[in-house]
Image (spheres, rainbow, N blue to C red):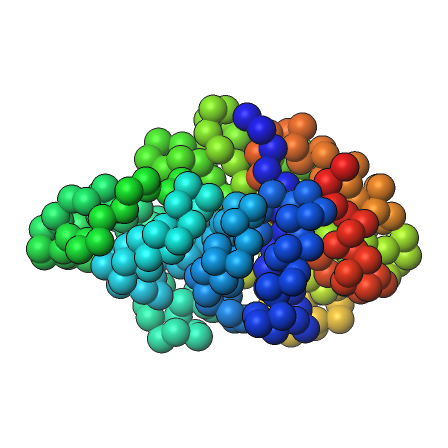
Amino acid sequence: MATRYGITIPFDGVTLAQHRDWFATLADLGYSDVWSAEVDGTDGFTPLALAAAWEPRLGLGLAVAPVFTRGPGLLAMTIAALSEVAGQRLTIGLGASSQPVVERWNGIAYERPYARTRDVLRFVRRALDGEKIDEAFDTFAVHGFKLARPVVDRPRILLGALRPAMLRLAGAEADGAVLNWLSAEDVVTCRREVGMEKFIAARLFVVPTADTELARTVGRRMISSYLTVNAYAEFHRWLGRADVLAPMWAAWKEGDRKRANEVIPDAVVDDLIIHGSFDECRAHIGRYVAAGVAAPTIAIVPIGADLADAVRGLAPR
């Protein structure tokens, strides 16, 4: 399977309108894909629609569209609309997201995330294939829905997956999995659950600076912000980091954010955050590819390096 070398959009500090020139630059530099996310910045679909229209050389991915924050029919329509523009360039990741995003920010109960993800995946695949759906799923019911604008070629559908049950679901019913916040060595553990033949994408956080202390300081803040969320905490317990991350979780629970950052070991930061010179960063990315990631997608944290320099310096060789 050929490796897709992607980058996360939109870039911080760059308006969506300004991305047109960036998309051309990315394609010229050899990036194969642009991948969006959907947390608290732009929605996941708008940046990809712009990239699809402005730069036909780029593949497009979304990691991930939360399965709670849009109704199933609207989600299917949105994917179908983007498919009209992007065709087979498109890969869609579906995922449960997290309690803060779904419940605290969107006012939607974060209940039975595995079942909801499974049901939305099944519905979306069938809807995109043109089926009329009248069915009560375990977590919602849809009556008489059929896309009025059929999808000619259904895009690749992945699942954002963190633990065995969701990883196995990705292998059994999706086209593969989207991984996040893991080391290159952890990829092997996850692939055992997904299946060796399935497509694996992973978002990789890159702090492109040779200033190790600066990179680790930034990395610690990122780790304590993410890995204290229950879904990610449970993921890393499953991966075997319960003991090394227990002091961080304890300090965070006590409200001591400074201490939570201080007690994260250097080795954990170095495993989860790619940093160093451009050559060192590309070599680290290569370890993820060697472990089975078909679509490594870098997320540049431009601290210690200009964004334009980092994009060029990290481009595939």
Please state, as top left, top right, bottom left or bottom right, where the N terminus lies in the image.
top right
Q: Along the horizontal axis of the image, is 123 left or right of 79?
A: left
Residue 98, horizontal then vertical, whole percent? 46, 61
Residue 250 seen in render: no
**Along the line of sight, which residue is nearer the eye, 62 or 276?**
62
Which residue lies at the image location 50% right of the left edge and 24% below the top edge?
196
Dividing the picture into quadrants, the one containing residue 131 is top left
Q: Residue furthest right?
A: 211
**Along the line of sight, which residue is nearer the eye, 315 or 62?**
315
Which residue lies at the image location 87% right of the left edge and 48% below the top edge?
277
Q: Along the horizontal axis of the image, is 107 left or right of 50?
A: left
Which residue lies at the image location 67% right of the left edge and 52% below the top edge?
26
Above or below 93: residue 22: below
Please state, as top left, top right, bottom left or bottom right, where the C terminus lies in the image.
top right
Q: Along the horizontal axis of the image, is 288 left or right of 216?
A: left
Above or below 73: residue 40: below
Residue 22, horizontal then vertical, whole percent? 66, 60
Residue 139, horizontal then vertical, whole percent? 22, 55
Residue 129, horizontal then vertical, whole percent? 23, 42
Q: Along the horizontal axis of the image, is 22 left or right of 82?
A: right
Which residue lies at the image location 57% right of the left edge and 70% below the top edge?
16
**Along the line of sight, which residue is nearer the eye, 28 or 163?**
28
